[in-house]
Image (spheres, rainbow, N blue to C red):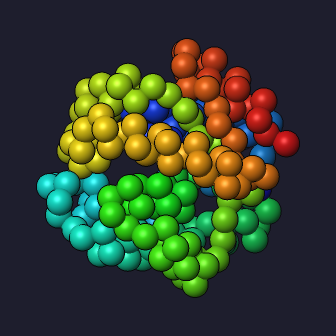
């Protein structure tokens, strides 16, 4: 099964992706845990271009193409081979992030979807969106060490818009996308994530 975890920056989705992969492994499943942008060596190189630096570094179209290049490399080199071996794949973000973030930044949702169909052609079997108050998530995201704060620099209004975008995706794809309450301890949220598994 191919599972993606999504959410605004600082929502805890990376922690939940790790905890879900650990839970599945404890059940005896073989799990590939990955992230995006990133996952494969080529995609990790592209990641640095996308998540570091000035928020206005790329136009929406350039940003969209970079995300798709990274995603395609990870899909070819790691995700498809893992699924072919019968492994579970848990990814920290997938195309839904692009649908929400790049559309919010002035991109065109129809273009995002067209590129997804043409270049990637693979949706997760299940997408779990960790839904949380944008102000609390932004404070958490900005407090993290490191330089990967390009989107946090866009501020609270941007994060609120992204949250609204994820809620819309849950309405657009009700068979695949589930909103998970992100309030509470990491273990409390992890229990809600596990409860959403088929």
Q: Quadrant of the N terminus?
A: bottom right
Q: Position of residue 54 (x, y in %)?
A: 14, 55
Name the residue: 25% across, 38% down: 155
Does residue 138 sit above or below 92 in this rendering?
above
Asked which quadrant contains residue 160, the reply is top left
Q: Quadrant of residue 51?
A: bottom left
User: Is residue 7 rendered to the left or right of residue 104?
Assistant: right
Q: Is residue 195 above or below residue 146?
A: above
Count every numbered label the image shows and give the total: 0
Taking the view exactly as shown, the residue that stands out farthest to the bottom is: 118
Residue 86 visible in the picture: yes
Q: Residue at x 69, y 32 (%)?
A: 193
Q: Quadrant of the C terminus?
A: top right
Q: Residue at x 49, y 67 (%)?
A: 109
Between 111 and 44, the one nearer to me in the picture = 111
Q: Is residue 133 left or right of residue 27?
A: left
Q: Is residue 183 above or below residue 69?
A: above
177 left or right of 185? Answer: right
Residue 101 position within the rendered picture, expressed as x and y whole percent measured from the top left = 41, 55
Residue 6: tell me if it is visible.
no
Where is residue 143 drawn, in percent x and y?
26, 27
At horizontal 39% and vertical 61% (from top left) the residue drawn is 102
Task: Tell me where residue 95 sits by quadrant.
Answer: bottom right
Q: Residue furthest left?
A: 54
In the picture, measured across the screen, residue 110 lies left or right of residue 117, that is left
Q: Which residue is more in the foreground, 3 or 181? A: 181
Picture coordinates of residue 152, whole percent (x, y): 27, 41
Farthest residue, direction right: 198
């Amino acid at each position: 099964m191919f599972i993606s975890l999504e959410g605004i920056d600082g929502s805890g989705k990376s922690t939940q992706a790790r905890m879900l992969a650990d839970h599945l492994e404890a059940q005896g499943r073989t799990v590939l845990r990955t992230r995006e942008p990133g996952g494969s060596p080529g995609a990790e190189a592209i990641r640095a271009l996308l998540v570091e630096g000035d928020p206005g570094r790329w136009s929406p179209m350039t940003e969209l193409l970079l995300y798709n290049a990274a995603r395609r490399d990870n899909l070819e080199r790691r995700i498809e081979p893992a699924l072919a071996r019968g492994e579970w794949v848990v990814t920290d973000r997938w195309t839904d992030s692009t649908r929400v973030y790049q559309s919010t930044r002035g991109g065109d949702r129809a273009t995002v979807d067209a590129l997804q169909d043409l270049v990637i052609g693979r949706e997760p079997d299940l997408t779990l969106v960790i839904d949380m108050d944008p102000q609390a998530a932004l404070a958490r995201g900005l407090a993290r060490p490191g330089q990967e704060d390009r989107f946090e620099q866009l501020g609270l209004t941007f994060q609120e818009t992204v949250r609204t975008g994820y809620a819309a995706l849950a309405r657009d794809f009700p068979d695949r996308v589930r909103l998970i309450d992100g309030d509470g301890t990491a273990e409390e949220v992890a229990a809600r994530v596990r409860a959403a598994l088929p």
